[in-house]
Amino acid sequence: MGDVADNLDSLVVRVTSPDNNIMARLTNRTQVTFEFRPDSFSKYEKSELEKQLAKACRVLWVNYIRGYSEAMEKVGLNFKTKPEDAATPAERRFLTERSQLGAFGNTKKGYIEIKTLGLIKWKVRITDKALTELSESQFLAELHTAGRALMHDFNRKMVFLKDECYDMGLARQMRARGIEPPSWR
């Protein structure tokens, strides 16, 4: 499995927003950075920036999944995304539910909120104040914070989804300690 981990750790995905003014880069499996072309940030209207960021996120994750799948294939493993390709009922349920897994991330001051459904559908909400009060570098820092919070939420929910589908015992252990496990839904 070291080859798979090495391949995934070295995978770098770069995309550009449809308007060609925002660049996004994913490294180390979950580290996402954004940057704007010179002089483009200040020209954005809120709704257009939200759309461009959401589209960039979608393309970034589609390309990451493609790279992830290729890395798995290099070592003879098959990464399944479609429920109809599942080998077991548990796997079918997992693949179905994963595509509907919602995650959310925002900033402490609420400047930016990001939502995803299955890492395929994306929605970015930016407050008016984010564009009037924040510099470009401050905005990018807020975007990074919201993105990290979203990935933390998604990964936490994935653990509990896997536990529920494959009965790994995590929820049982938590309940035995008097802790109700969080819902992945």
Image (cartoon, rainbow, N blue to C red):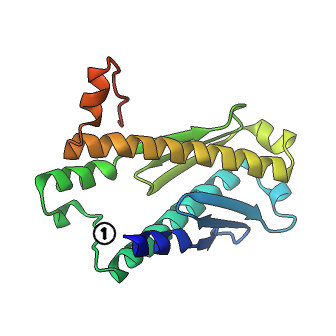
Q: Is residue 11 above or below residue 101?
A: below
Total labels: the figure holds 1
Q: Residue at x 36, y 74 (%)?
A: 72
Whole-percent x and y of residue 88? 12, 58
Q: In which quarter of the view is residue 82 placed?
A: bottom left
Q: Residue at x 24, y 37 (%)?
A: 169
Whole-percent x and y of residue 139? 78, 48
Residue at the farthest bottom position: 74
Amino acid carrying label 1: it is Phe
The residue carrying pointer 1 sits among few (fewer than 14), some (14 to 19) or many (20 or more) residues within 10 Å by Cα, namely: some
Position of the N terminus, as image quadrant, is: bottom left
Q: Residue at x 86, y 39 (%)?
A: 133
Whole-percent x and y of residue 106? 62, 38
Residue at the farthest top position: 178
Whole-percent x and y of residue 150? 54, 44
Looking at the image, residue 116 sits to the left or right of residue 41; the answer is left
Residue at the farthest front position: 2
Position of the C terminus, as image quadrant, is: top left
Looking at the image, residue 157 sits to the left or right of residue 43; the answer is left
Disc 1 secondary structure class: loop
Observer able to see residue 15: yes
The residue tagged 1 is 79
Q: In which quarter of the view is residue 163 placed?
A: top left
Looking at the image, residue 185 sits to the left or right of residue 136; the answer is left
Q: Is residue 60 above or below residue 146?
A: below
Q: Is residue 185 above or below residue 11?
A: above
Looking at the image, residue 146 sits to the left or right of residue 161; the answer is right
Observer able to see residue 66: no
